[in-house]
Image (cartoon, rainbow, N blue to C red):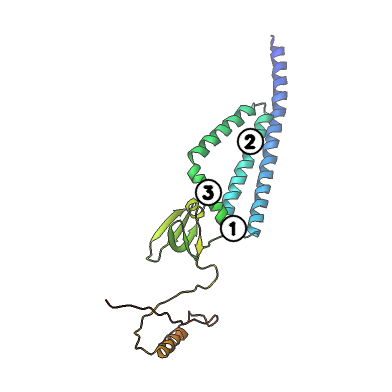
Amino acid sequence: MNVEGLISRAKELIAVFGLKFVAAVAVFVIGRWAAGAITHIIEKIMKKANTDETLTSFISSLSYIALMTVVVIAALGQLGVQTTSFIAILGAAGLAVGLALQNSLSNFASGVMMMFFRPIKVGDLVEGGGVTGVVKEVQIFTTVLITPDNKTIIVPNSKITADKIINYSSQGSLRQEFTFTINYSDDIDKTRKIVAEILDRNPKVLKSPAPDIGLRTSWAMRT
């Protein structure tokens, strides 16, 4: 092939691949803009629904990454790259990662559910996952609790959602029972009056419903 033929062939290749390159760049630029716009819409919707800020940020980032993956694959397709094998490799890699991180993914799914349905929130006194404490933070994978003796316990979210959750703070008030022992010779009416006065002076005791002061007797036999 002479020089003129080589130049002609080079021009044809440049023309063909130039158009493909321009198309790939256009797909990438437009796709990147669309991914950003869609991610912004998702973030706006989640914020309007008062979704937890941590979850909003995570879902937005995850959505953007997923959309940009599609954009890159589409751009490579415009360049003539066989994307079928590329997608298969991504799928296999994703499956391997999913199997390796199945416990973490379980905690993540539980964290998403907790942030969406909000069975507990920061400041609540709860019992879950075999632990009782005040919720300090609900994260994507774990929940941080402060126990009554001031210990910090980090509980996997899947362990909390796998069992019942008792929220002592959800109703705004909590019934508490106290038992006091007196002798049979003591004045019952006077005892009631003293207990009622103590409860009345306590600002944390609700006036309505009023405290119930009852009497429970027990019998003991000498042998």
Q: Which mark is residue 108?
A: 3
Q: Position of residue 188 (x, y in %)?
A: 40, 88
Residue at image point 59% right, 49% down = 59
Quadrant where the C terminus is found in the figure: bottom left
**Residue 66 in the image: above or below residue 9:** below
User: Label 2 sits on what residue type?
Assistant: Val
Quadrant location of residue 147? bottom left
In contact (CB < 8 Å): disc 2 and disc 1: no
Q: CA distance from mark 3 to mark 2?
A: 27 Å
The numbered mark, 3 or 1, whose residue comes first in the sequence reads 3
Q: Position of residue 47 (x, y in %)?
A: 63, 58
User: Label 3 sits on what residue type?
Assistant: Phe
Residue at image point 40% right, 60% down = 152
Q: CA distance from mark 3 to mark 1?
A: 14 Å
The residue mark sitting in front, 2 or 1, is: 1
Other residues around mark 2 within 10 Å, as few (<14) / some (14–19) / many (≥20): some
Q: Residue furthest front?
A: 223
Q: Identify which residue, 64 or 184, lies in the foreground.
A: 184
Q: Position of residue 218 (x, y in %)?
A: 38, 78
Q: Identify which residue, 94 or 53, lies in the foreground.
A: 94
Q: Which mark is residue 117?
A: 1
Quadrant location of residue 29? top right
Q: CA distance from mark 2 to mark 1?
A: 35 Å
Other residues around mark 1 within 10 Å, as few (<14) / some (14–19) / many (≥20): few
Q: Position of residue 68 (x, y in %)?
A: 63, 40
User: Label 1 sits on what residue type?
Assistant: Phe
* Local secondary structure at mark 3: helix
* Local secondary structure at mark 1: helix
Q: Which residue is mark 2?
A: 72
Q: Identify which residue, 125 or 64, lies in the foreground.
A: 125
